[in-house]
Amino acid sequence: MTSLFQSDPAVLVLEDGTRHRGRAYGAVGTTLGEVVFATGMTGYQETLTDPSYAGQIVLQTAPHIGNTGMNSEDVESRRIWVAGYIVRDPSRVVSNWRSENSLDEALDTDGIVGISGIDTRAVTRHIRAAGSMRGGIFSGAAAGIDADEQLRLVREAPAMAGQNLSGQVSVTAAEVTPATGERIGNLAVLDLGVKQATVDNLAARGFDVHVLPQTSTIEDILAIDPVAVFYSNGPGDPAASDAHVEVLRAVLDQRLPFFGICFGNQLLGRALGLGTYKLPFGHRGINQPVLDRSTGRVEITAHNHGFAVDAPLEGSFDSPHGYGRVEVSHVGLNDNVVEGLRALDIPAFSVQYHPEAAAGPHDANYLFDRFADLVRGTVADVQEDEN
């Protein structure tokens, strides 16, 4: 394992030529990805193990990171997914009784190249002004590579726009978690980068949760006799996920109840006939205010997305693909970005944020109850029609 405070030099290089020198943190070497910032003061373990961050070099705006260490209970998936990690001040000690190892050790074990000791506030302000961009962390011997060569490598790395990353993070075979609440039925979860907290919340609402590979067809979904379908969060550009959209349209044609979060919200938008676009620097963190228009309640929510749905904010509108009336159900209060969709003539809705929010906040957890109620009502209607 590497030591917490390495002597190896490191440099963060952005595609516009900006350079920030620091010290190696985690694994030593080279990594490339989209540099984004996350504003959460806590929950770094949940952030690191969220598959939605695949392909991204994550900068923590909170200056002091690592003081609670890492443990096996709070992980959201089978590994750390970030492409790289940027912190200002790594904690000198791990002081939480639940800790099993240090953050630095966990990064090293999973081969995550990081950098510490740089002015993260300056980098954040730069990204907010110029937008998220490709970057690279070069540490150890790689820090000594010619600056022009480092910049060339960064600029030749693929941009996030146009990338389909679901195959990197999805399960390859179905996994089933039995219901822990009063059973409703089988739920088909298309794994685009699902978090464990999502599975746990769905099981607690009475679903036998079938987590299916992202390559699943409508036939694969129907084969488990689902009472509903769920699309998870995940990394990448929704415009590059045509196959997932076609499957979702088949789900909507079946009138199966549907709930999508994060990436699933963007794919519902596309299935309904709406477009998506890339945000300048996205929303990442656990302190994003969102208005639920049905209740007038403002929720503090957890986000991780760099793309959004393009939809009219006021009133209802007709789905361009013929699924009836649709409305924007939730709106981000920082920038009026669409944060939720609700179909008014079919049983389908979605939100752009994370109602499971394992690191908190829990303001949006009611959405799992709303989904369970929707499914129970739909099942009851079907049984009544059959009788």
Image (spheres, grey):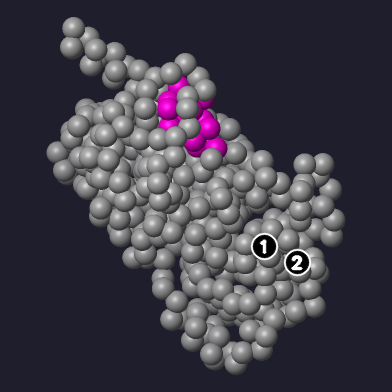
Report the quarter where the N terminus lies.
bottom right
Q: Residue at x 69, y 81 (%)?
A: 140
- In this rendered view, identify the residue nearer to me: 157 or 276: 157
| Image x and y of residue 262, in percent | 42, 45
- In this rendered view, identify the residue nearer to me: 244 or 342: 244
| Image x and y of residue 43, in percent | 66, 47
- Pointer 2 residue: 1
Judged by its main secondary structure, the magenta piece is: helix
Q: Which residues are magenta?
A: 197-209
The answer to whether residue 327 is magenta is no
- Pointer 1 residue: 109
The answer to whether residue 198 is magenta is yes
- Outermost residue to the top: 387
| Image x and y of residue 97, in percent | 82, 41
Q: Quadrant of residue 175?
A: top left
Q: Amino acid at mark 2?
A: Met
> Is residue 219 visible in this depiction of the protein?
yes
Q: Looking at the image, is mark 1 or mark 2 earlier in the sequence?
A: 2
Q: Residues within 10 Å of mark 1 (few under 14, many from 20)?
A: some
